Amino acid sequence: MRAPRTLVVGAVAASMLAGTLATASAAPTTSSAPSAAAVSTATKPSENAKLNKTPTPKLKWFRCYATSECATVDLPLDYDDPKGPKTKVAVLRTKATGKRVGTLFVNPGGPGGSSTDLAQAASRWASPTIRKSFDVVGVDPRGIGASDNVRCLQPWQQQSTFAPLEDVFPVGWTKQQRYMGSMKKIARACSTNKLATAMSTAEVARDMEMVRRALGQGKLSYMGFSYGTQLGATYANMFPSNFRSIVIDGTINPRSWSGTPWNKSRPLDFRLGSGKGAWKAMKQVLAECQKAGDPRCEFAAVGDTRKRFDALVAQVQRTPLVLRDPDSGQKFTVDYPTMIGALLSVMYGSDAPTQVDAILTELDYAATEAQGGRAKTPKPTRASRQVLLAAVDDAVGAPARAMYDNSYDAFLSVTCTDSQETTRLADYPRYDTQAQTTAPHFGKAWLWSSSGCAGDAFTGQDEDAYVGPYDRYTPKGVLIVGNYWDPATAYTGAVETRKILGRSRLVSSDSWGHTAYGVSSCVTKAVDTYLVSGSSPARDRTCAAETPAFPTREERARKTAPEIAEMTELPKGAGEQTFPEPVVVD
């Protein structure tokens, strides 16, 4: 996998992936009545008391990026030392277009995604109901985006360090050793960076709470996607009486993400199960392709789609394919890790089956020709080749480039501080073998992406990281959204989180890609109603598929909010101010 995308590992409990989809989708019967222990824990004002020692900041807004307002605020690097070193955090607000209900904080995931980008792009992903009712506010997590930037390596070190990570995952002893060496180097560097070791999700929750106080506009409303669901669950348990409504879409099981005594001896993806979720989605695409048939799904022309997929993977494992870019004429190679990375990349989209079909059809044609046979699939077109090229670029786009890219620095700083692994990096080749058994192909990609979190690689920890409990009594309920075919945050994460957050409700979506808001109109309506009213639904609900797996052009699904956030670049209007260049913290 490339430098981890919006989640983002975004994530999902492997140890609890029990049962079929049918049993998993049943609404859990969790009582909303809190236990005495939960009530006692919830009433302790420890987090609020800690933040009360820090003066509420004043936000000095300025107009920015043509349609928004921006501000920066200096917050304590360590809230136990409110007068000590500070870190600058960026805030962006787009004002409500109608009668305002309140302020909606947003986070796109990652870890490493920019919340200010997501807030600025609100008109492209948020429904008219949300845009009318809420100021949409993004607070870039510390170390990320327009906030002070974490930098674990010096610029001259990055290219050589990241070169082995250009493989989506390493195959063979030599590449595995090189991969582990690079991961250890950057993880060790982040472990001694003063900002990196203060970037746990708990610190981001505290920063968000300080901005909420600075706004002075009532209790928090929040919508988080992918890794942003961990932020939402963490805030709900750290500040259980401070929120009005929290939506988490593409949900991570918080106990699986955070290190606990019973799970931190396991690699992160074995706890989260993202690889299993991706393999489940891939198998479903192949089954739907078989059902739809050619020409709706061109890969169906091969006959048994699952058998041909297995044979195609085996062929590419033996002999990588050499293809040509129709525009530049340059040749490029698709080996086994690149093939899996490209497929995983397109499965993030709401049109995942169509994109997977395009890639498999391309590769089948090339592989059959390479063996001197006659392909049953159609001859590649310029459009289908561009789909493959874009997916390959997305999969292998490691940050070894002219300008310093801190995406891995940010990803590891948050993920490893939270997950608290006690694993050994030298054991990852053995975990690789296990992953291939439990989550063929995709388990490898997810496993290696967070291998820098091994206990003997990342050694810096935040003593103020939050690791639970996650079942505190909350006066208001959290709305959980889970998508059946999510390749990053598997649906089981939403089901498990529903059981943990006792006053929560679960909206299950039979849709493709990573997250469901904005793609499923049923999900969108349920989320909008909850956010505007501030009241949880009476019961869990399931949203049926609204488009076929292989739709016509007119039936195509819309893009998800994380997709839009990834494509967003903050515009620069004439005469408009922008965020100042972030301070880099080595």
Image: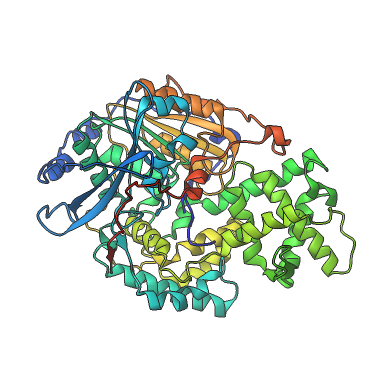
Q: Is residue 563 left or right of residue 573?
A: right
Q: Position of residue 499 (x, y in %)?
A: 41, 35
Q: How is the image coloured?
A: rainbow
Most extreme residue toward the bottom, as rendered?
174
- The correct choice, above or below, for 219 with respect to 413 in the image is above
Q: In this orientation, which residue lies closer to the viewer: 11 or 262?
A: 11
Q: Residue at x 35, y 47 (%)?
A: 575
Q: In this orientation, which residue lies closer to the viewer: 378 or 244?
A: 378
Q: Position of residue 277 (x, y in %)?
A: 56, 48
Q: Position of residue 273 (x, y in %)?
A: 51, 51
Which quarter of the rendered picture does the C terminus lie within? bottom left
Most extreme residue toward the front, as rendered?
575
Is any part of residue 257 visible from this angle?
A: yes
Q: Residue at x 25, y 34 (%)?
A: 240
Q: In this orientation, which residue lies closer to the viewer: 148 or 20?
A: 148
Q: In this orientation, which residue lies closer to the viewer: 175 or 555?
A: 555
Is any part of residue 441 visible from this angle?
A: no
Q: Is residue 378 left or right of residue 168?
A: right
Which quarter of the rendered picture does the N terminus lie within? bottom right
- The correct choice, above or below, for 427 with respect to 248 in the image is below
Q: Position of residue 577 (x, y in %)?
A: 32, 48
Instruction: Give residue 425's quadrant in the image.
Output: bottom left
Number of marks present in the image shown: 0
- The correct choice, above or below, for 163 with respect to 256 in the image is below
Q: Residue at x 55, y 27 (%)?
A: 521
Q: Residue at x 75, y 56 (%)?
A: 382
